[in-house]
Image (tube, rainbow, N blue to C red):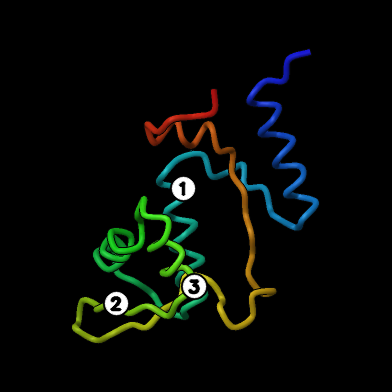
Amino acid sequence: MTTTKSQIELDLIAKLGDLKYTYRPDIRDRAALEANFREKFEALNRVKLTDSEFQRLLDGVVTSDVYNAALTLRSINSFERDDGTPLNYTLVNIKDWCKNDFEVVKHNEFLEELGLPTLP
């Protein structure tokens, strides 16, 4: 019996659900992912970003460098707002990890939309 990549992905989503991850079938493309990230970021940091601030934030945090991504994820970071004031922010709750929400999306569909390699 051959297991398809779609079935492997569904099994993983089910396992993550057992670990209290929330499956987000509504996040199917980059625009939905970025909107979700913005909502979570603004709530965590108690701030409302302008569109240009959010784009600069994305440009600063999205990287393929795993080491730098891990540093950014676990640190207090700084960002200059449109009005020149600094914004110190985190990407996750680094003080109370147990208060973070964990979500999962269908990876292969999303990678295809981004034009990235998928599972064979």
- For residue 22, side relative to residue 63 (left or right): right
Tag 2 residue = 79
- For residue 38, side relative to residue 22 (left or right): left
Q: What residue type is labelled 3?
A: Arg
Q: Which amino acid does label 2 sit on?
A: Phe
Q: How far across and how far down the image is residue 56, in percent?
A: 26, 64
Q: Residue at (35%, 56%) from the top-left corner?
A: 62
Distance of label 3 from label 2 (alpha carbons): 16 Å
Q: Residue at (66%, 34%) from the top-left corner?
A: 9
Q: Residue at (39%, 36%) from the top-left corner?
A: 114
Disc 3: CA contacts within 10 A as few (<14), some (14-19) or many (>=20): some
Instruction: Point out the residue furthest to the top here.
Output: 1
Q: Which of marks 1 and 3 is nearer the N terminus?
A: 1
Give me the disc on residue 74.
3
Q: How far across and how far down the image is residue 7, in percent?
A: 70, 27
In which image quadrant can residue 12 be found?
Answer: top right
In which image quadrant can residue 21 be found?
Answer: bottom right
Name above or below for residue 7 compared with residue 57. Answer: above
Please tell me whether mark 3 or mark 2 is closer to you in this view.
3
In which image quadrant can residue 86 be found?
Answer: bottom left
Name above or below for residue 13 compared with residue 21. Answer: above
Quadrant in the picture for the C terminus = top right
Badge 3 element: loop
Residue closer to the observer: 36 or 71: 71
Q: How far across and how far down the image is residue 61, in percent?
A: 35, 62
Residue closer to the observer: 96 or 27: 96
Badge 1 element: helix
Q: Which of marks 1 and 2 is nearer the N terminus?
A: 1
